[in-house]
Structure formats: structure tokens, C-alpha cells
Image (tube, coloured by chain):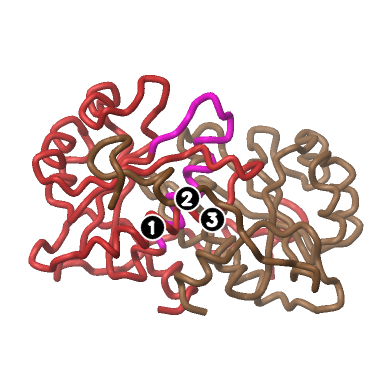
Chain colours: A brown, B red
Amino acid sequence: METSEAISRAMTVREYDRSKSLDKSSIRKIIDAGRMTASARNMQAWSFIAITDRDLLGKIADLSPSGRHISNAAFAIAVVTDPQNRWSEIDSTRAVQSMTIEAWDLGLGNSWVGSIDRDKVKDLLKIPRNLNILTILPFGFPTKNYKGKKSRKPFDDVAYLNQFGIKFN
Amino acid sequence: METSEAISRAMTVREYDRSKSLDKSSIRKIIDAGRMTASARNMQAWSFIAITDRDLLGKIADLSPSGRHISNAAFAIAVVTDPQNRWSEIDSTRAVQSMTIEAWDLGLGNSWVGSIDRDKVKDLLKIPRNLNILTILPFGFPTKNYKGKKSRKPFDDVAYLNQFGIKFN
């Protein structure tokens, strides 16, 4: 898919078509998109745990008030940050967006789950205590019901030229 | 360009070839990539100021200890966040990465400038006091000297499967 199409169409998906199968190489490509992202001083203060185990996905869903749909995902990625690096959250967020766009190119949607019982999920995934979970991203193929229509503010409401409030055009 | 190529190749660029000219439609495409990005509860708590005025670019460069190269950019984008929205920085960062990848597809590199005299730049760009500048992104065509070789941690150092520390493969 052309880059601009993937970027403009990629959107949050929370209902997944479980009839389609996914191979591990797609997960690798998605993580690689994150890995290749730029970071402050190239510190790359991130790690990515691919979660494919269905039992784990179910348990994480139970620990995520806004992420019940994780249990139905094809897989999920836990994005792990290092609070000792002051740019870790920002840089890992950049990586998340790279992964989101790469996934869309492979036909997969995702969502950003932020409401998580982090301590319990850290225990479950054996994440060291000194690291944090930024988000858990469930990925999956959109269902047939997926409309794919984005609602966004008009360009003129968010884009300015040389001065705040001055229209771009 | 294919999406995966743009994502894997996009990298920080701080030296710009000023002999190539840029049309305003490319800037619009880049901002649109940010505008179309997903955000928490679709709040879109962001705005983007395209800076094309060379006098302004020079003044902003002077106010950015780590962004002297802004003065030589084809243009820059100031990414403005709303601290009243708790997700504004994270969401705007997602938008930055969309813009970075879109720009790469158009042949333009950028860099994340974070060290800025924000109050003075806010005055310069007439940004309301209650809003913040997350970053200023200078964009430009890479020079001929640009090597385009990324240095990143090996996949196995950042990617795990089902448990922190367990190799993906």
C-alpha cells in the first residue's frame, strides 16, 4: 500500500475477525517498524512484548478496564518503557505510531489501551519492576462490519501558517 | 513509496539541501497526516503551525539551543498541545510520527527539536498562553552527504514473546 494511504486510513479497531489467520512474520514486521523509529539521542529506550498466547491475552483483558477486546485480538504488543530515560514515553509513542501504520499496511487495525492494572500485568509478563507499561496494543483484522470512516476536525481548525490562528490557505 | 519502506527508512535529518524547492501542497499533505492520526477518545487536542517565513525560521532557530538547523529548513511545523487534555502530548506525538513518515514518502527528512525557549517562541507565533509547544519539527530534503544508514539495537534486544526476556524467535 502507498504510504499516504496507510497513514490516512489507519484507524482504531476494537472488533476483530478471528477467522483470518496471522503468521508470525507479520508480527515481526510490525515490531520492526517500532524498532526502526527515531528516538532522542537514538537511545531506543523501549521494548516490545508480542503476546500471542490466548490464555495470556484473556488474563490481560481481564486486567484492562478499557481493553476487554484484547481477549479477541489476533495478538497484542505490550510497549515497555524505561522511566530512567526521560524521553522513553515520547519515543515509545513514536514507535507505536510506526507499528500502527505498518500494521494497517498488513491489513491489521489496533487500539491504544491505556487503562491497565499495570502492576499485575507486569507480574504476568515478568516485566522488571523498574520498567513501565506505556500501553498494550491489541491487533487484529477488522470485521466485516468495520466502516472505516474517520471523523476528524477540519483542516482549517488545526492547521495554521506562520502564526497561531492564521489559516494555512 | 511502499509503506514499509517509508517507515523503515525514515530517519532524523538535520542538514538540508536548499537547492530543491518545495510546494505548499506537500506541507498540506504532511499536516494532513498528523490530522488524520488516532487520538484518545478522538479528542484531537493538537494544532500544527507551518512555518515557512524565513525570518521566523531564523528567529526560532536562535531560540532553540538544539535546533540551530531550523534556520536552514525548507519549513518547520510547531506542534501545539493543550495541557488541559491529559493525552495531548501522547496523541500529538503519534501525529508527529505520522507526519514524519508522510514527509519521508515525499522525500523530506525532519528532526524532533525539544530544546526551545518555549515562552519566547509562543510569543513569536502568537500561541495562546494556555497551550504548549511539544516540539518544533524542521523539514527539508537531505543533502547529498546524507548516508541514510540507521543504527538500531538488534531485534532480539528489544522484542520478546509472551514474556519479558524471552526471545521472539
Q: Amino acid at mark 2?
A: Pro
Q: Mark 2 highlights which residue?
A: A154
**Residue under pointer 3:** A97
Nearer-the-camera pick, A168 or A132: A168
SS at badge 1? helix
Q: Position of residue B107 (x, y in %)?
A: 28, 70
According to the picture, the residue beneath numbered tag 1 turns out to be: B100
- Residue A51 to residue B126: above or below: below
Question: Which range is magenta?
Answer: B80-101
Q: For numbered disc 3, what is the local secondary structure? A: helix
Camera-side mark, 3 or 2: 2
Task: Kindly report the secondary structure that dominates the magenta region of the rendered protein.
Answer: helix
* Classed neighbour count for the residue bearing mark 2: other residues with Cα under 10 Å, few (<14), some (14–19), many (≥20): few
At label 3, the amino acid type is Gln
| Image-based side of A119 in relation to A160, left or right | right
The N terminus of chain B lies in which quarter of the figure?
Answer: bottom left
List x then y, in percent, for residue B30.
36, 59
Front position among marks 1 and 2: 2
Q: Residue at x 60, y 51 (%)?
A: A47
Q: Residue at x 22, y 23 (%)?
A: B120
Q: Quadrant of residue B146?
A: bottom left
Q: CA distance from mark 1 to mark 2?
A: 21 Å
Name the one closer to the observer, A60 or B108.
B108
